[in-house]
Image (tube, rainbow, N blue to C red):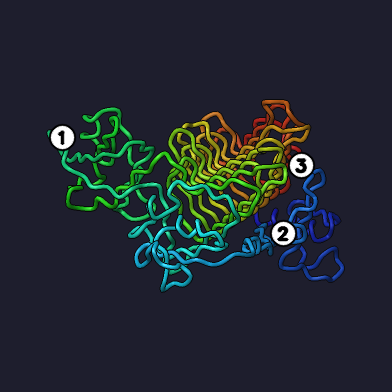
Amino acid sequence: MEKMHRRDFLKRVAGGTCALASGVALPATIGGCGREAPAKVAVATPAGFSWTDHPLVGKVFVSQNSVFSTTFDATTRKFVGGATYYVDVERGSDNNAGTSEDSALQSIAAACDKPDAGTVRVKGYGIDKPYYRGRGFNNRTQSRPINIIGYGPLLPYVTTHDVLTFAPCPGKANVYQTTRPSVTECMDMAGGAPGTRMTKTTSLEACEASPGSWYQSGTALFVHAINSRNLSSNGASRIWALLNVPNFKSVGDHTSYLENLVLYGGIDCVNASGSTPSGGTLVLVNVETGMSEAGGGNNISARGVDAVLASCRTTRSGGDGHNYHAYNGKVPNVIEIDCVVTDCNRSRTDQNSTAHDGARVIRVGGTYRDAGAANVADINGTDGEGTESWNLGCSAFGAGPGYANWQCGSIDNAGAAPKMWLDSCDAGKAEYSTGSFGGGLIYSHNSSLERNQSKVTPY
């Protein structure tokens, strides 16, 4: 494999003139000209990929062992303007001015509601002191540009749960009850982050028999902790009953920038929608999301907005991990850099990352594992344009039964054939590495692909 990477690297440097036969020793110089091979070279956008003026032009590089990197800095995409407000769930008060750390507000919603707010800085305490629903976004919709940035030695956890108290359930050993309707997922954080996703049962008897489970009956919530502890006196705050309400929700043609945050729960953990064909921009930098609504909510939904995701971790969604759609006449352009997306498999029909409706996506250095369906699926089109993705140095492993790790195609015939480019990508632990349908086209360069379900064209 190392020789293959080295051989491909020299071809890139020499502009395709360095065609070496298998088994031939690899030279230290290029083309016999005495020129030293550089540590890395820029990667050209493949012919046919229609997003030719994307922000990564001249900023994506590959090393001699096919490791991709970029000089693109997602933090430069912040909103510029407005005042800065501080939030501290432990020391703050919503009666404070919020204009300094010493006068911090207590809830994120209070800071975002300030008419001149441009940046909200959120003090992080990890899972010990989360920004639960009333201290987080509290079901609000962001309608103006905003930067929300975590700071401190620990990340802020922003959730959709309420603080609950429990009482023993009569006649049921180790089961505790409270009043809390509209629960969609239950987490037990007693073992620390990322927490244990508790199993929803269909009866109180099953809950009693199963540590780490919960049961909903009307407005009553019943919980059997993972270690069968007494929730009346021990660790009730570590039970996060996540509600079927928004977490971060933004509507409008503006910039929503989130950095250094962990968001658990919500119909979608992050949902940004544009209002017109101009659209807005969603930027996530070092953001972890998990546990979107069990009935099919996505951890991240970008509808009619451009999106940039850098160094994000996405796991255990109710639907897709990353989901991109056209909306209100805007077709999104998307960049994912060094993202890790795993276990988005609640319904066994969900993807870790998926683009639709003619969206154009660039993924660099991503890892996509153990989806319910395809790990990466770029499909369909709109207004005659097919969805396109260019994937560089990405791994996709463990697609669901009957699915390919990399999937491209059309089921609505609303656009041209979707296209997917795979550069130095790999795939495994699935029935198929790649699969195309409905006219979809997959192109591969220097990729490690086995058991392709349909034709893959070298480029």
Which mark's residue is nearer the viewer, 3 or 1?
1
User: Label 2 belongs to which residue?
Assistant: 60
Residues at circles 3 and 1 in contact by the CB criterion of under 8 Å: no
Which mark's residue is nearer the viewer, 1 or 2?
1
Local SS, label 1: loop
Local SS, label 3: strand
Q: Position of residue 192 (x, y in %)?
A: 33, 55
**Could you say which is closer to the camera, residue 281 or residue 289?**
281
| Residue at x-position 66% and y-position 48% | 253
Q: Position of residue 162 (x, y in %)?
A: 33, 48
Which mark's residue is nearer the viewer, 3 or 2?
2
User: Label 1 belongs to which residue?
Assistant: 172
Q: Residues within 10 Å of mark 1 (few under 14, many from 20)?
A: some
Looking at the image, is 197 positioned above or below residue 417? below
Which quadrant does the C terminus fall into? Answer: top right
Q: Is residue 420 visible?
A: no
Give the left or right position of residue 248, taking residue 157 as reference.
right
| Residue at x-position 61% and y-position 51% | 282
| Residue at x-position 36% and y-position 47% | 161
Q: Which amino acid, by three-letter code, is at mark 1?
A: Lys
| Residue at x-position 58% and y-position 41% | 323
Q: Which amino acid, by three-letter code, is at mark 2?
A: Val
Going from N to C along the chain, the mark reached first, 3 or 1, is 1
Kindly report the distance in space between the C-alpha atoms of the residues bearing marks 3 and 2.
21 Å
Q: Position of residue 31 (x, y in %)?
A: 85, 63
**Could you say which is closer to the camera, residue 99 or residue 87?**
99
**Could you say which is closer to the camera, residue 347 or residue 168?**
168
Looking at the image, is 311 positioned above or below residue 266? below
